[in-house]
């Protein structure tokens, strides 16, 4: 706590930078703690929001420009690493065709949309100026939300963060269980479909009998 209080501004910037990359990291907890420090008069809430927004926007550019580095390949790799459906790339493209630039706003609050859709945003007509005009206000709102939550909780933020941590662990375990079950079910359906196709190919064809006039 003493270290975090001493390096609050740097910790906020680095934490939001890492959190925006979609790497599992308690950046939101750091923002809430910083907000509690601001409520006690130890830091400036406006400076925290500005630094947090800067870290978020900087990392968000990584996802937006990832398409230039081969967005399709990155998405396919991420799909394999997260055991997602093989057609996650067409799904992401479908989001962009259906919702357009709105995915930039949604992606700031939903990591799945940010990871899957943003690398394809430029090739689907979301220009850089549009991205900045949508991402900066969304990042500002996201950062202010967590700093404000810490401000409201005040000294009770530590107890709240402990509860959030245990809830996060429980949700993570449940998510892993769901992923494993879905993966096994999908594999079983694939095997069943393949067995049915082989059986239908091996069965003799039944001749059709025309009715006599």
Image (cartoon, rainbow, N blue to C red):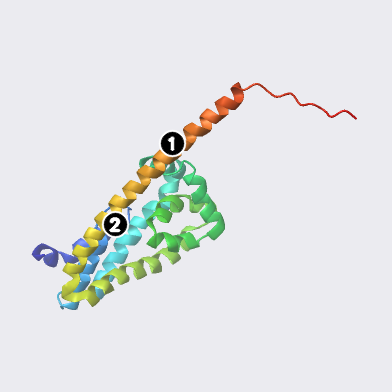
Q: Is residue 30 left or right of residue 201?
A: left
Give me the C-alpha separation between circle 2 and circle 1. 32 Å
Q: Which residue has dot 2 on it?
A: 19
Label 2: how many residues lie within 10 Å, few (<14), some (14-19) or many (20+)? some
Q: Is residue 112 visible?
A: yes
Above or below, 94 against 10 in this view is above
- The front one of 204 and 122 is 204
Percent across and percent down for residue 146 are 28, 69
- The front one of 160 and 135 is 160
Quarter occupied by residue 203: top right
Callout in the foreground (2, 1): 1
Q: In the picture, which quadrant includes the N terminus? A: bottom left
Percent across and percent down for residue 35 are 22, 72
Q: Is residue 159 left or right of residue 57?
A: left
Percent across and percent down for residue 126 are 51, 57
Residue at image position (68%, 23%) is 205
Q: Which residue has dot 1 on it?
A: 187
Percent across and percent down for residue 197 are 57, 29
Q: In the picture, which quadrant includes the C terminus? A: top right
Above or below, 156 against 55 in this view is below
């Amino acid at each position: 706590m003493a270290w975090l209080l001493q390096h609050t501004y740097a910790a906020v910037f680095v934490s939001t930078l890492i959190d925006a990359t979609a790497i599992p990291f308690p950046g939101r907890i750091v923002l809430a703690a910083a907000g509690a420090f601001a409520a006690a008069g130890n830091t400036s809430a406006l400076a925290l929001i500005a630094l947090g927004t800067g870290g978020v926007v900087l990392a968000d550019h990584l996802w937006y420009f990832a398409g230039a580095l081969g967005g399709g390949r990155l998405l396919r790799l991420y799909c394999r690493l997260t055991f997602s459906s093989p057609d996650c790339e067409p799904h992401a493209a479908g989001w962009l065709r259906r919702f357009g630039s709105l995915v930039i706003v949604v992606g700031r609050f939903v990591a799945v949309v940010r990871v899957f859709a943003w690398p394809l945003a430029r090739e689907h007509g979301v220009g850089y100026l549009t991205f900045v005009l949508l991402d900066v206000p969304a990042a500002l709102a996201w950062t202010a939300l967590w700093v404000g939550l810490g401000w409201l909780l005040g000294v009770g933020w530590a107890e709240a963060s402990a509860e959030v941590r245990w809830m996060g662990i429980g949700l993570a375990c449940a998510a892993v269980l769901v992923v494993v079950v879905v993966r096994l079910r999908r594999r079983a359906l694939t095997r069943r479909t393949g067995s049915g196709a082989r059986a239908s190919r091996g069965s003799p064809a039944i001749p059709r009998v025309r009715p006599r006039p």
